[in-house]
Image (spheres, grey):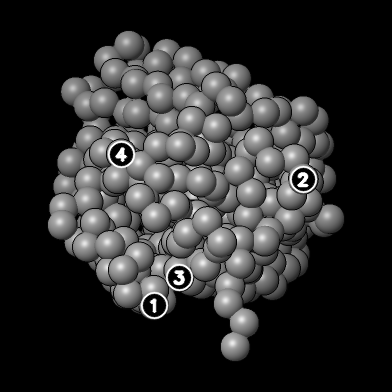
Amino acid sequence: MSRPTTQGLASPTDASTAAPTIQLDSLATAVVLLDASGHLLALNLAAETLLEVSAARAVGSPLLDYIDSGQEWPTLLQQTTMENLPMVRRGLELRLHSGSVQTIDLILSPLYRSDGIQILLEMNPVDRLNAISEGENLWSSQKTLRTVIKGLAHEVKNPLGGIRGAAQLLALELQDPSLSEYTDIIVAESDRLRNLVDHMLGPREQLTRTATNIHEVLERVRQLVAVEADGSISFQRDYDPSLPEFLADAAQVTQALLNIVRNAWQAVGSEGTITLRTRARRQYTVGGRRHRLVVAVDVIDDGPGVPEALMGELFLPMVTGRADGTGLGLSIAQVIANRHGGLIQCHSEPGQTCFTLLLPMETPPYDSR
């Protein structure tokens, strides 16, 4: 039986194996190579994202410099080195010094070399797999919902047009001018229902994609909501300055984020704080498609949280937790995200609600409708 080798995994300074390294960078699995003493020799892009560190900075450092390991991680590395046998751990807690915590499935494999043993780590975040499944389900349900709404809009708008036209003809035949008040009501209510159906469908114009800076969009949204709130709301910004521009319909993305931030403002009132955060996610799956680079825009508020009964219906039209709400803002934002090949997700608990807008930073081959 042949033994595993390190071929295809290289440190950033190893130019001779650049092509194989690119192949590993395309993996969603985090791959890390350690020497026998637990120092990092190489890691792929997924591992950089998972450990929240760049390869250029990390290579040569002990892995345990980045992990709040307790006793389990040192024991696992030591056992793999001493026993020369692969090991598997399911549901292992990965706690970073930054404070973030993830649950991962871990495979440790000893690699035999003439100069000693190295350890290959393969880490799959369980939380990420669950998020992919959740995202696919949400994407599928939104696609089905859009199909239903389009069919419903067609069935509603056709008779509405007939009712409106009949009311206008009736108004011309009435001898008593005072009766025209009733036909005016019919026409006005027909127009109101038509506009409501149009809003449920969301933007229908073609996407006009231009080079878009997501931080310029967020600053525009922040300024608009700050003016609307008359300066009563506090904003915190946590932007990733390394994010590049990407092709998107800036006006529609602005509308989507404006709807989300307004929703957060309504949740916190005049005494809360809204945090706007951006991060890059590499090799990330959205709606069943894996993308090389995705921008994640988090809108976090410290309000009372979303009622559990509404969590599964947040993005449905006409669903709202406020008596004066239309229930269309989040639905329209989701439609805009979907048309860009993206998705909006929500996680909420009292004191922290986070809406995350995920947008692929490469142009999809179609305009999602």
Q: Position of residue 260 (x, y in %)?
A: 45, 39
- For label 1, the residue is 85
Identified by mark 1, the residue type is Leu
Q: Is residue 368 at all visible to an observer of this figure?
A: yes
- For label 2, the residue is 16
- Which quadrant, please, contains the C terminus? bottom right
- For label 4, the residue is 65
Q: Quadrant of residue 123?
A: bottom left
Which of the two discs, 3 and 2, labels the residue nearer the N terminus? 2
Which of the two discs, 3 and 1, labels the residue nearer the N terminus? 1
Category of crowding for the residue at label 4, using alpha-carbon neighbours closer than 10 angstroms: few (below 14), some (14–19), many (at least 20): few
Q: Position of residue 51 (x, y in %)?
A: 41, 45
Label 3 SS: strand
- For label 3, the residue is 109
Image vertical order of residue 187 relative to residue 80, above or below? above
Identified by mark 3, the residue type is Ser
